[in-house]
Image (cartoon, grey):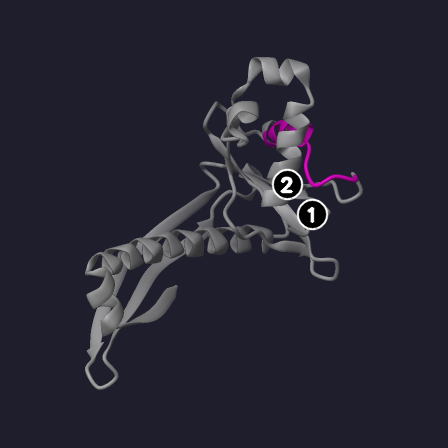
Amino acid sequence: AGAYTQIAYSDIEKYGNEILGRLERVFANAAIRAEDRKILDTIIGDADVSELDKTGAGKNFDADWIVEALSKLMQQGKEVKPEDCVLCISPAMHEDLLKDIAASQPLTYAKPEPVRTGFVGVFMGVKILIPGYLPEHDTTNHYLSGFLIHKNAVVLAPKRELLIETERDTVNRKIKITGTHTFAVALVDNKAVVEIKTASTT
């Protein structure tokens, strides 16, 4: 994965070298997003990953679906402990999950943080992630899938850390910056993942 940009000398003179440090942080975040995308594309590409089809549910997400997905993992012989799993969902899915929790008085009493902060970070021991990309399970209607992923499901192997290279273009008075990240991803246990098919498109 890679990213490229260029900065005019005048911008560096105006804002100082701090702008280069900020760009490096942006590139580091882009490297993480590239890893996320590769992991999710690898998972959806495996036809043997179990699934919950919620495309006809009339909502983008429901808190009960997390319970169903955890149950499916256990039915497939996976031991599930708090913090063992992450749930990757889209912003629209997160919004409906938040609404579902906020609408339940018992849930808001037991877990008031989502109501106070407007964000669900952990629910039922599952860490909630919004990776910025989810693959489509229906490319015609652009329906997205969420994923409940056990920590033992995927192996991420970076060949090397993010490499930032700079090059001066003295003719055009610009600095060219390239960030590259080399890594491999393998789905080592397709029974440790549950794909949640939704009708969400955002």
Q: Can residue 193 be seen in this view?
A: yes
Q: Is residue 49 visible?
A: no
Q: Is mark 2 on a helix, strand or loop?
A: helix
Q: Does the magenta stretch include residue 68?
A: yes
Q: 3 or 67, which lies in front?
A: 3
Q: 136 or 43, which lies in front?
A: 136
Q: Residue 93 carries which label?
A: 2
Tell me if 131 is positioned left or right of 142 in this view: left
Predominant SS of the magenta segment: helix
Q: Mark 1 points at which residue?
A: 200
What x and y, as percent, mark residue 164? 25, 63
As drawn, 26 above or below 103 = below
| Residue neighbourhood size for the residue with mark 2, other residues' Cα within 10 Å, grouped as few (<14), some (14–19), many (≥20) | many
Which residue appears at 66% of the width and 36% of the height? 96
Q: What element carries label 1?
A: loop
Tell me if 142 is positioned left or right of 11 in this view: right
What x and y, as percent, mark residue 127? 49, 32
Q: Is residue 163 magenta?
A: no
Check the picture and name the quadrant holding the N terminus.
Answer: bottom left
Magenta stretch in the rendered image: 58-73
Which residue appears at 51% of the width and 42% of the height? 189
